[in-house]
Image (tube, grey):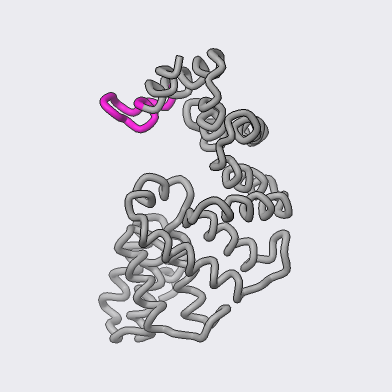
Amino acid sequence: AEAYVDLASCYKYGWGVQRNYDEAFKYYKKAEEAEIPSAYFRLGLCYFLGEGTDVDLSLAQTYFEKALDLANNKNAYFCLGRVHFENGNYLEAIKYFLEAQQISSDPTVYYWLGILYYLGRGVAVDRIKAFAYFKKSVDEGDKNPLWVMENDPIWGYTDSIWWLAFCYEHGEGCLKNPVIAFDLYKKGHEKGLHPCTYRMGLCHIYGNGCQKDEKYGRQLIQNAANNGYEAAQKWLQIN
């Protein structure tokens, strides 16, 4: 029966077969019917991400809770935090993120804690703590590039690069440092993060943290706009 989970994962990740989320979901359900505990977490992800089924945060929460209670899957702490964040239950979200922080140096845990402290969701606004969490997220992501490659499309580690750069650019929770901000925007641009491409372009336009180069700056902003980044599109309309 464990083979159901293995087969489902092959379809989910495209290991030896063409990726097919519908087939993955089908076999995870068969694993659940065979009372395989590891299926609970996988099904939670399916319902959270809408892979092979419709997005259903209520069912995602149910399966993540089963994964934690019945399969002792500690990764469920973070996922429960994400579910509660999406539902606007920020006090519950931060509780689960802090639990996840105790057991893992996962970059995304630090990212979401940074967001909560920056925006003041479930906690008082604290830009110093937010900056520290964004920096920790970037540092841990740099240490684990293979982890990032596999997980970032879902959980958003690279967004922490933008937030950290923004903090340095504007002195949010740290001393203002346009050079470090530019380097981080460039790093995000190289990872395909369009908001960073846009901000890097602005840095070149105005010579913030780098040599002024209006032509190249406009090219970068056009690149971000061509990839659907709305702020870049609006900037081009008025400049």
Reply yes or no: does residue 17 show up in magenta: yes
* Residue found 35% across the figure and 81% down from its top: 205
* Residue found 36% across the figure and 25% down from its top: 11
Q: Position of residue 206 (x, y in %)?
A: 37, 85
Q: Is residue 26 left or right of residue 185?
A: right
* Residue found 68% across the figure and 45% down from its top: 87
Examine the image and state in which quarter residue 223 appears.
Answer: bottom left
Q: Is residue 230 left or right of residue 62?
A: left
* Residue found 67% across the figure and 46% down from its top: 84
- Vertical relation: 216 (above or below) 178: above
Q: Quadrant of the N terminus?
A: top left
Examine the image and state in which quarter residue 4 appears.
Answer: top left
Q: Front-most of 147 and 203?
A: 147
Please state the extent of the stretch shown in magenta in the rendering. Answer: 10-22
Q: Front-most of 209 and 33?
A: 33
Reply yes or no: does residue 185 show up in magenta: no
Examine the image and state in which quarter residue 13 appears.
Answer: top left
Q: Quadrant of the C terminus?
A: bottom left
Q: Front-most of 73 and 234?
A: 73
- Vertical relation: 73 (above or below) 18: below
